[in-house]
Image (cartoon, grey):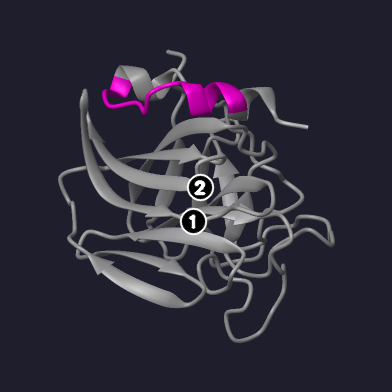
Amino acid sequence: MENVSDREATSSPEPVTRDQFTKYSEGLTLDLNTLSKHLRLSEKNRVIQFSYTDQEYPDHPERFGCCQVLCKEGVRGRSYWEIKWTGHVYISVSYKSIRRKESRHGSDFGRNNKSWRLYCSESRFSFCHNDKWINLPAMPSSDRIGVYVDKGAGTLCFYGVSDTIMTLIHSINTTFTQPLYPGFAVVSIHSKVTLCDLTM
C-alpha cells in the first residue's frame, strides 16, 4: 500500500527556502538503546559528546560499539532536521539493520551499504557510503547542518544553514530499500552534536 506521506511528497514541489524545508521538520529523539558507551548526553538528551571513559549504560544488542547513536524515529516521506556541530562529527542516515559491533569499521556510518554519512570538521568535509569517499569543500563558517530526505524519490541532501540561507553541501539520488533513521557520531574530544528544535 502506498504511504500517504510518500504520495503527498510526490505531488508537492521540492522545497527551496528554509521556511519550506522546515515544514517537513521532524522532532528527533535519540534511541538510548543504540547509544555507544563512548558517548555521553546532556541538556535533556539533546547534546551528544565524546567520552574517553566508558559510560555505565546497560548492555543491549542494539548498542553500538563505535561512537554512534541512532534516533528512534524513522524517516517518513519527506523529512528535514538540523543539528549544530563542533569538532569532528558524522551526520548520517542509516538502515536499522546496520551492524552494531564489527571489526575493521564494518559498523561505522558510511563504511557499509546500509548507511550514508557526511563528515564535518573545520578543515574538511567528506561524504561516504559503502566505504567510497568523496572529499567536499569545507564550510567552516556554518556550524549548522540541515538534512533533507525524500525517501520516495530517493533523495538525500545536506545543507549548510546560516539564518535563512541554505547552501547545498552534497546531495545524492538512490533507491532506499529499508526504513531510514537519522544517526550521529562524535569521534573526538571537544566535539559535539546538538539536536536543533525547529518548533521554536
Q: Which amino acid does label 1 sit on?
A: Thr
- Between 59 and 10, the one lying in front of the other is 10
Residue 157: x, y in percent?
37, 45
As helix, strand or loop, the secondary structure at mark 1 comes to loop
Would residue 141 be counted in the magenta stretch?
Answer: no
Q: Residue at x 30, y 23 (%)?
A: 18
Range shown magenta: 7-18
Question: Could you tell me how far apart the alpha carbons at marks 2 and 1 are, in whole angstroms?
Answer: 5 Å
Q: Nearer the viewer, residue 160 or 62?
A: 160
Nearer the observer, 67 or 12? 12
User: Is 141 situated left or right of 11 in this image?
Assistant: left
Earlier sequence position, callout 2 versus callout 1? 2
Q: Report whether 167 appears left or right of 170.
A: left
Question: In what element is the residue under mark 2?
Answer: loop
**Residue furthest toward the bottom?**
104
Residue 10, percent across and down?
A: 51, 28
